Amino acid sequence: MQRTIHSDFALRNCLGGLALLCVLSGWAGTAELHVPPTLEAGQSFSIPAEGSGQATFYLVGPDHIVKRTVNLGSDLQVQSSDVRTAGRYQVILCAPSSCTSATFEAKAAPPARLSFFLHPSRVPVSTPQSIDATAFVFDQYSNPVLAPATVDFRITPATGAGFSRPSSAQHGVAWVRMDATPHEGRVQVTAVLGNVEEARVIQQVAAEACGLRMKAVANGNMVNLETDPVRDCSGNALPDGTVVSFTKEDKAGKSTVDTPIRKGIARAQFRFDGPARIGVACGVVLGNEVALNGKL
Amino acid sequence: MRSMADLTLPFKKITLEFVKLGLVRAGFARTASFVVAACVLATAQSSPQVHLDAAGLAPRPIEELTGTTIARHYALAWQYMTGALESGRTDALGEEFVGSAKDRLIRRIGEQNQTGVHVRIVDHGHRLKAIFYSADGAAMQLLDQAQLEIQTFDGKKLIDTQNAPQEYMVLMTPGADRWYVRDLEEVSAKTF
């Protein structure tokens, strides 16, 4: 019985002490902050703040810090401008005697911008797996959009039908690798995600020469050499300036003339003495040979 | 006052595991994995340990030198960022950040100075996983699992301590002599 009386007395003292502590601190019931675990960047929200009296509210984000005195018992308003940057935020509420905290993550808003890279800027026609298109997906606040999304890469060649290559963006990046199309000229690649579009242009140029041929016209002890129009295997003319090499071999030895293509044709002139052989080459491609035996 | 031996000791931690594992010649791109723990004598403060895993990286495999450079500069970036956030000095960020990462850090430090709030980061290391390396070599995306203790202060008063693993999505781009941190965003593990 005596033990019971003592216990009641101790319990009353303990509860009284707790009540006094709460009154002195002027703050009760803010042990937990209820914040949404995730929200969309740029969306305002409120945090219920239980208790009474004043406290200091902190919002610590990736590039923004809010600190203000608040009255407990009313909701704490977080403005949309406070959470525009995606990432982790800390919410801290401090009464004079103690602080409580919580964290939440702001995720990127819907896609609003594509950062698009097309590589290389020039590529020979019909080269397999030679074009790389990479698109980074961002929201209106320049946060990378990490949620899955499908980016459609639409290819529009200078001639021929266009086509598209969809790609799933992983962690905010979508990419495709594709073959160059068979015809030279401007190729536009447009990355499309919803109503967001970003276009880039690549220049396709002729590939290596194909079926290189020359003809020779003798004039005394001189020979004039002229190629047929120099084209690649898809029929694209090699650009002017591409070097063609003519090599003559006779009893005087070996001599080579390197000459650029002009208007699709390369020309050279040799003096020859007695039997001679002349060959033509462009890059790694060999053309026909002409034999001269003092006359054609 | 730390002795020179103390300062150079972290250099001994520099380990290139791919050499030990014999990965230099065979299959480096598939199994590239190495540790760089660099020490910067000029600041007499050691960089955090960074472990880079580049296994299965696409669409371009990583070169040995690139991997070493990325790990070293990412470690330096964290070292400088930690110092800048604690000191409230934007110039302490060094040259490791560019673009939005730099802009955001400068803004954050400015607002720290305005509010009197600052953070102290105790960095226990980073496990970097390279997840995308563009075909032209112009950008690399990485996921960082960092072990950090983040203490938040208002003036001299400690108001919060976070001591949990953190995940960061990182975008790095190459410059003339280094790889820069272009974007650094803390994300939840659920993102992956």
Image (spheres, helix red, strand yellow):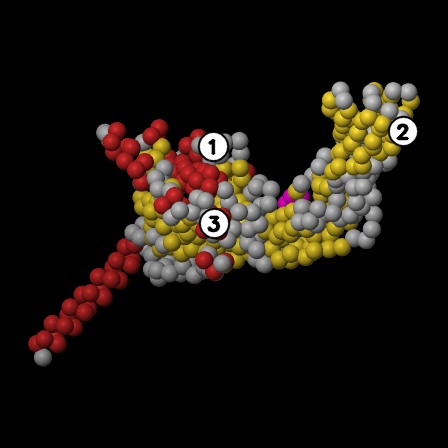
Question: Disc 3 marks which amino acid?
Answer: Gly
The reply, left or right, for residue A96 in relation to residue A258 is left
| Element assignment for label 3 | loop
| Element assignment for label 2 | loop
Spatial CA distance of label 2 from label 3 is 59 Å
Question: Disc 2 marks which amino acid?
Answer: Leu
* Numbered range of the magenta stretch: A114-118
Question: Which residue is tagged 1?
Answer: B95
Mark 2 Cα within 10 Å, few/some/many (few <14, many 20+)?
few
Residue drawn at the location 41% of the way across and 32% of the way down: B92
Q: Chain of mark 3?
A: B
Question: Which residue is tagged 2?
Answer: A296
Q: How many marks?
A: 3
Question: Disc 1 marks which amino acid?
Answer: Glu
Mark 3 Cα within 10 Å, few/some/many (few <14, many 20+)?
few
Q: Chain of mark 1?
A: B
Where residue A225 appears, as percent x and y from the top left, is 85, 28
Which tag, 1 or 3, sits closer to the chain's start? 3
The verdict on residue B119 being magenta is no
Question: Which residue is tagged 3?
Answer: B27
Depth order, front residue of B128/A14 = B128
